[in-house]
Image (tube, rainbow, N blue to C red):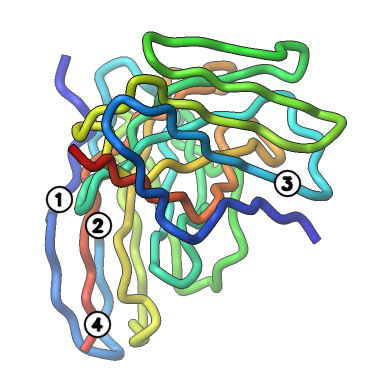
């Protein structure tokens, strides 16, 4: 069974630009969560999607948004990039809301210059 | 406010010994707690889940305990090997099963 895939793996952007990251969950998994990981703050929850609906949202500004498609693939978008958005963005999938184990992808390393 | 604390100092341990990591939390009443392993440049990998009504859980050389009175979980790696060198993260669910709050992780270095 293929794992969670994320594209691109690395990205360099400049301040003010926007970026879209993509995540393909494990086949059959309907829940996709996004996390931001930085050395200072660690892993922080961004949002979770289930059956194309955002169910939970973390404490991030509205510049961070996402969506989920009918095939469970998900994208997250960050607009008006700031230097502090430089981080590893991780996507995790799980079967459904009652299944607790999350399977993480390799992440997208975003650098904002 | 809610906090999850893991030791920020790396744990250096001799091969074959038992590594013990601590996860303390405040202002949570989690139904379960999870442990993940993360290698540099990779996403976390799920290791174990322990529920609030379980005192101990084992998987191969790994053992986790969960004390809801002390608000603490201990993670043990017995007969440690250099391949166990990684950062280990504890995670608690917040509202909703798939919204996890993570500790900052504890690095383990197993010395051959």
Q: Nearer the viewer, mark 2 or mark 4?
A: 4
Q: CA gap, disc 2 to disc 3?
A: 32 Å
What number is the disc on residue B25?
A: 3
Measured in 3D between alpha carbons, the distance from the residue under mark 2 to the one under mark 4, in whole angstroms, is 14 Å
Secondary structure beneath disc 3? strand
Please name the residue shown 71% across and 39% down the image: B95
Q: Residue at x 53, y 30 (%)?
A: B75
| Secondary structure category for the residue under label 2 | strand
Can you tell which of label 1 and label 4 is closer to the viewer?
A: 4
Mark positioned earlier in the residue sequence (2 or 4): 2
Q: Which residue, given by chain and number where applicable, does mark 1 sit on?
A: A7
Chain under disc 3: B
Disc 1 chain ID = A
Crowding at mark 2 (Cα within 10 Å: few <14, some 14-19, many 20+): many
Q: Is residue B100 left or right of residue B41?
A: right
Chain of the residue under the numbered disc 2 shown in the image? A
Residues tagged by mark 2 and mark 3 found on one chain of the structure = no
Q: Which mark is residue A112?
A: 4
User: Which is more foreground, mark 2 or mark 3?
Assistant: 3
Mark 3–mark 1 distance (CA, rounded to whole Å): 34 Å
**Which residue position is annotated with label 2?**
A21
Rendered location of residue A84, percent (x, y): 39, 82
* Disc 2 + disc 1, Cβ < 8 Å: yes
Q: Are marks 3 and 1 on the same chain?
A: no
């Amino acid at each position: 069974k293929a794992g969670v895939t994320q594209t691109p793996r690395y990205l360099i952007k400049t301040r003010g630009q926007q970026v879209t990251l993509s995540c393909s969950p494990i086949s059959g998994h309907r829940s996709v969560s996004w996390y931001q990981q930085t050395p200072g703050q660690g892993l922080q929850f961004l949002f979770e999607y289930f059956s194309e609906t955002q169910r939970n949202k973390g404490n991030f500004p509205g510049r961070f948004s996402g969506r989920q498609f009918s095939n469970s693939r998900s994208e997250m978008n960050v607009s008006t990039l700031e230097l502090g958005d430089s981080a590893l963005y991780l996507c995790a999938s799980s079967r459904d809301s009652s299944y607790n184990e999350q399977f993480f992808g390799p992440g997208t390393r975003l650098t904002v210059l | 406010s809610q906090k999850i604390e893991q030791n920020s100092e790396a744990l250096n341990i001799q091969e074959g010994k038992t590594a013990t990591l601590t996860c303390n939390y405040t202002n949570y009443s989690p139904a379960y707690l999870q442990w993940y392993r993360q290698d540099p440049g990779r996403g976390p990998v799920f290791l174990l889940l322990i529920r609030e009504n379980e005192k101990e859980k084992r998987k191969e050389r790994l053992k986790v305990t969960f004390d809801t009175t002390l608000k603490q979980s201990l993670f043990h790696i017995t007969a440690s090997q250099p391949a166990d060198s990684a950062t280990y993260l504890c995670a608690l669910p917040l509202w909703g099963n798939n919204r996890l709050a993570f500790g900052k992780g504890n690095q383990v270095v197993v010395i051959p």
